[in-house]
Image (cartoon, rainbow, N blue to C red):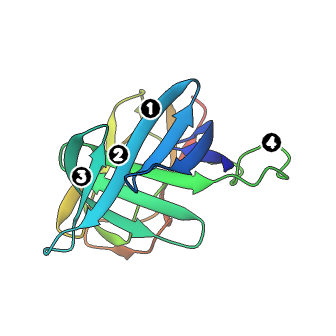
Amino acid sequence: MRRRYLIDGQTHDVVVTRGADGALQIDRAGRRISARAEPLPDGRHRLTIDGRDHAVWIASSADSVFVHGNATGAAEVETVDPAAADGHARAGAADALSAPMPGTVIAVHVAVGDAIVAGQPLIVIESMKLETTLIAPRDGRVRAVHFGVGSSFGLKATLVTLADA
């Protein structure tokens, strides 16, 4: 099955099939990846990619899957609507840092108007007993910080909005 996914802001065309061993075979740009997920007793999943195991939390919504592991960080995989004008499911996604899963803000490192650089930590959240630091994807300024320390938020809530420098 040919699909288009948005993974952390980048669009990927992939072909997904199921191998004889039951694992998913994912072909992207001429590279084949074997993947499977198995539930663990503590609520996490064992995600096996090309023979390497990763213990991760997996949360899903109607159109997205969020994967978060201590060693792997957080990633969102979203099905892209090919009928969308720009091929992306959300307009303005580059300026809005969204929550990869519901949680609570535990630290805010920036304020409205602050100049930021790509890679700079902006906000730290806790979801499912794991801390995730959201970093600036580009240089710019902070337009808005939507939640303060101790605030709870839902799945895909916009946490920080960026503006051009």
Q: Nearer the viewer, residue 97 or 50?
A: 50
* Of marks 3 and 1, the one in the foreground: 3
First of labels 1, 2 by sequence position = 2
* Of marks 3 and 2, the one in the foreground: 3
Residue type, numbered disc 2: Val
Q: Circle 4 sits in a helix, a strand or a loop, which is it?
A: loop
| Cα distance between the residues tagged 1 and 4 | 28 Å
| Cα distance between the residues tagged 4 and 2 | 31 Å
* Of marks 4 and 2, the one in the foreground: 4
Q: Are marks 3 and 2 in contact (CB under 8 Å)?
A: no
Residue 41: x and y in percent read 14, 75
Residue type, numbered disc 3: Gly
Question: For mark 3, what is the residue?
Answer: 69
Quarter of the image holding residue 57? bottom left
Residue 49: x and y in percent read 32, 42
Residue type, numbered disc 1: Ala
| Cα distance between the residues tagged 1 and 2 | 9 Å
Q: Can residue 100 be seen in the rendering of this structure?
A: yes
Residue 46: x and y in percent read 22, 58
Residue type, numbered disc 4: Asp
Q: Circle 2 sits in a helix, a strand or a loop, which is it?
A: loop
Is residue 67 toward the left or the right of residue 94 in the image?
left
Question: For mark 1, what is the residue?
Answer: 115
Q: Can residue 136 be seen in the rendering of this structure?
A: no
Is residue 151 toward the left or the right of residue 87 in the image?
left
First of labels 1, 4 by sequence position = 4
Question: For mark 2, what is the residue?
Answer: 110
Question: For mark 4, what is the residue?
Answer: 86
